Structure formats: structure tokens, C-alpha cells
Image: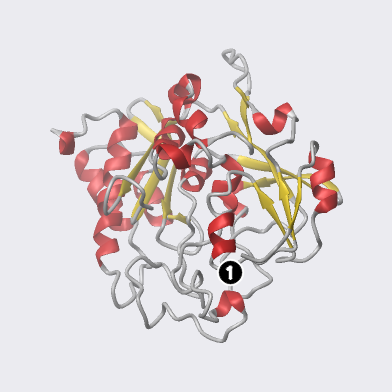
């Protein structure tokens, strides 16, 4: 890999000051499970690598679950530097947000989960093999063409309308966090700001864009999740159960009152350049009792607008299955597919 200067700041403010105002010349290092691969492949060639592993701010490094009293509003804080394994194993998070802990528990293998962080999972680069090939000048590296559109695209997007680049967003935590109504707190050269996670991601199409809307010298500090008493679940379909990214993911959340689901949220992962909100499925489920029949219809509705590429039409069926099973899991139904 290209030689670089390595920095170890102990505060977020110092880390921000070390970052450049344009992409590519400086990079943040957390777990390193994505950045080091990109450097070895000469896709990322920074002059400076700024490690966040020595930042000692508790807001950045801890999970804070406040005491939740009836009739009061509360929110959980998860630092961006928290390891994925800690999220997956946290007992209080499991009770409140099984969609999040289940998603965290399936990322990579134990080694990845004990190195990778929440912030890294949200901000990682896409996994398109054309983007990660140092010899291919795709749209995201200054080229004129998305090679996956007419090439090897079996793992790419099926919701592609209006997107010249057909990557899928690689974050497995994002769909669950969006379904739960989470927001990200960031710090940059102009101070702090808070972004809804549903507005955090974008579909990049050129080198000066990333899979998120942060500026180059901005850092995710933590994620805030409101405690709203939502039933929630995440279901993934994978080619294999270890060391793999999901082919399709569905994260759902809703209130259950009098047997009826309200405030329904259905978010699809790994099927579009950004986490995809299944609007038609949400409308179908709103105000209804969740039954296997309704869940199956919701799965059908979740495919509205899908435009598969030449090799990934199979994902349409996987969306139907993932949505149906996520809804049934969140409703408390017995997962008969495991019997």
C-alpha cells in the first residue's frame, strides 16, 4: 500500500482538525476491517490515516441505556466507537431493539465483530467488485461507466431507478436503525449536528461523494435511538451464514395496540444504493392485524418498483420472504420456518 502518516488523537476535536476538507487525502481508522482492505487494493490511497482508537470520550466509546420510566421520553446512546460484538451481546439492547442486536450478531465472523465499530459499519464503502478493482475506473473513481449495469451484477441493486451506480448500501445496521427512528450525532469543523438516519445515506455517482452525506472532515460521534416501545425485528437472507454480506435484509418496527399494527416501518437492506423504505408494504400493514397471510401480501408489496438487473432477479423473491418473516418475528409469531 501507499506510505502514509499515522495519527493517534485522543479527542474528537483533535481528530477533526487532522482531517482534510476533501475526500481521499485523509482517512479515519476505527476497526480497520474496511479501510485496510481498500488501501491494499490501492482504492484508498490517503496521505494521512487518523486513528480513532485512542479517543477517550465516553460518549464515543460507550452504550448508555437510561432508566426508562412510564410516560417519559428516553433515548439510548450508542457511541460510534462501540464494537459490533458489544452491541450484539448487550442485554438491555436485546430487550429493547432485537432488530439491531440480531443484525449486529450476524455481521462477518467473531473476529470482524470484535474489531468493527458502529460508526465504521454505517460509513463503510460499498462492496462492488468493480469499485474494489484497482484497474477499473468506474463512476466512483472518475470513470464514465457503471460496469455492473451490464456486467457481473448478481449481488447488486434491484431498486435502481434514477441511480447511475447500482451498488447496494453495505451497512447491515442501517435498516434496523432507520426502522427504529434513530439519528446520528456528528462533529465537524463547524461544530455538532444531528441527522436522522433515514437522511444519512445517499447514492453516490462520482469520486467526491460517499455512501453517506457527511463532509470529508466530519465524524460520527454516536447514534441516538428513541425508546418508543416498538415491536421490531430484522431478517436476512444470506448465501452462507459466515463471512458474508446479506443478499437481502428486511428490518421492521411498529406499535401493537389492540392487536393492530400502527406506525409501521419496513426498511430493506442490500437491495438499493441506500436503505430502501418499502412504502407500499408499510401502507398495507398499517392498522391491520399481522397474520401470515397479511405478512405474505406485505412481502409482495415491498417489491413495488423493483427493476432487477440481468443476474439478480432472484432478489425479488428474497425480499418477499424477508419482509414476511421479519413482520412475523416482530409480531411474536412462532418462526415455523425453523421447525
Query: Where's residue 219, x and y in %?
Result: 72, 48
Q: Is residue 183 visible?
A: yes
Query: Where's residue 16, x and y in %?
Result: 81, 49
Task: Sort mark 1 into few (<14), some (14-19) or many (20+) by Cα contacts within 10 Å.
Answer: some
In which quarter of the view is residue 105 placed?
top left
| The N terminus: image quadrant | bottom right
| The C terminus: image quadrant | top left
Residue that numbered label 1 is attached to: 43
Q: Residue furthest left?
A: 339
Q: Is residue 336 left or right of residue 11?
A: left
Q: Is residue 26 left or right of residue 258?
A: right
Q: Is residue 291 left or right of residue 60?
A: left
Residue in view at x 24 percent, y 30 percent: 333
Query: Where's residue 182, x and y in %?
Result: 58, 39
SS of the residue at dot 1?
loop
Q: How is the image coloured?
A: secondary structure
User: Who is closer to the viewer here, 94 or 284?
Assistant: 94
Residue in view at x 31 percent, y 57 percent: 301
Residue in view at x 79 percent, y 46 percent: 15
Query: Where's residue 85, x and y in %?
Result: 48, 32
User: Who is closer to the viewer here, 135 or 121?
Assistant: 135
In which quarter of the view is residue 64 placed?
top right
User: Who is closer to the viewer here, 228 or 205?
Assistant: 205
Q: Is residue 263 visible?
A: no
The total number of labels drawn is 1
Q: Is residue 216 left or right of residue 164?
A: right
- Classify 16 as above or below 207: above
Amino acid at each position: 500500500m501507499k506510505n502514509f502518516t499515522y495519527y493517534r488523537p485522543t479527542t474528537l476535536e483533535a481528530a477533526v482538525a487532522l482531517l482534510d476538507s476533501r475526500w481521499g487525502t485523509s482517512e479515519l481508522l476505527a476497526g480497520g476491517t474496511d479501510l485496510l482492505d481498500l488501501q491494499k487494493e490501492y482504492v484508498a490511497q490517503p496521505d494521512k490515516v487518523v486513528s480513532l482508537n485512542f479517543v477517550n470520550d465516553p460518549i464515543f466509546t460507550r452504550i448508555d441505556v437510561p432508566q426508562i420510566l412510564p410516560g417519559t421520553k428516553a433515548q439510548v446512546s450508542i457511541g460510534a466507537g462501540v464494537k459490533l460484538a458489544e452491541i450484539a451481546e448487550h442485554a438491555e439492547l436485546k430487550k429493547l431493539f432485537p432488530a439491531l442486536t440480531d443484525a449486529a450478531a450476524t455481521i462477518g465472523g467473531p473476529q470482524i465483530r470484535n474489531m468493527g465499530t458502529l460508526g465504521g459499519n454505517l460509513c463503510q464503502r460499498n462492496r462492488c467488485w468493480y469499485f474494489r478493482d484497482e484497474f477499473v475506473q468506474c463512476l466512483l473513481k472518475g470513470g464514465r461507466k457503471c460496469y455492473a449495469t451490464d456486467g457481473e451484477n448478481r449481488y447488486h441493486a434491484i431498486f435502481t431507478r434514477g441511480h447511475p451506480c447500482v451498488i447496494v448500501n453495505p451497512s447491515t445496521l442501517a435498516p434496523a436503525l432507520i426502522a427504529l427512528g434513530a439519528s446520528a450525532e456528528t462533529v465537524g469543523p463547524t461544530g455538532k449536528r444531528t441527522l436522522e438516519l433515514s437522511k444519512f445515506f445517499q447514492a453516490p455517482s462520482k469520486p467526491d461523494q460517499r455512501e453517506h452525506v457527511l463532509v470529508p472532515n466530519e465524524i460520527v460521534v454516536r447514534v441516538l435511538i428513541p425508546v418508543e416501545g416498538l415491536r421490531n425485528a430484522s431478517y436476512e437472507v444470506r448465501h452462507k451464514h459466515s463471512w458474508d454480506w446479506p443478499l437481502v435484509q428486511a428490518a421492521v418496527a411498529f406499535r401493537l395496540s389492540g392487536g393492530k399494527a400502527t406506525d409501521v416501518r419496513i426498511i430493506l437492506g442490500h437491495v438499493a444504493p441506500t436503505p430502501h423504505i418499502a412504502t407500499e408494504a408499510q401502507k398495507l400493514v398499517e392498522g391491520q392485524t399481522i397474520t401470515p397471510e397479511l405478512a405474505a401480501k406485505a412481502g409482495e408489496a415491498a417489491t413495488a418498483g423493483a427493476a432487477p438487473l440481468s443476474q439478480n432477479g432472484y432478489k425479488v423473491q428474497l425480499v418477499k420472504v424477508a419482509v414476511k418473516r421479519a413482520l412475523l418475528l416482530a409480531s411474536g409469531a412462532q418462526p415455523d420456518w425453523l421447525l
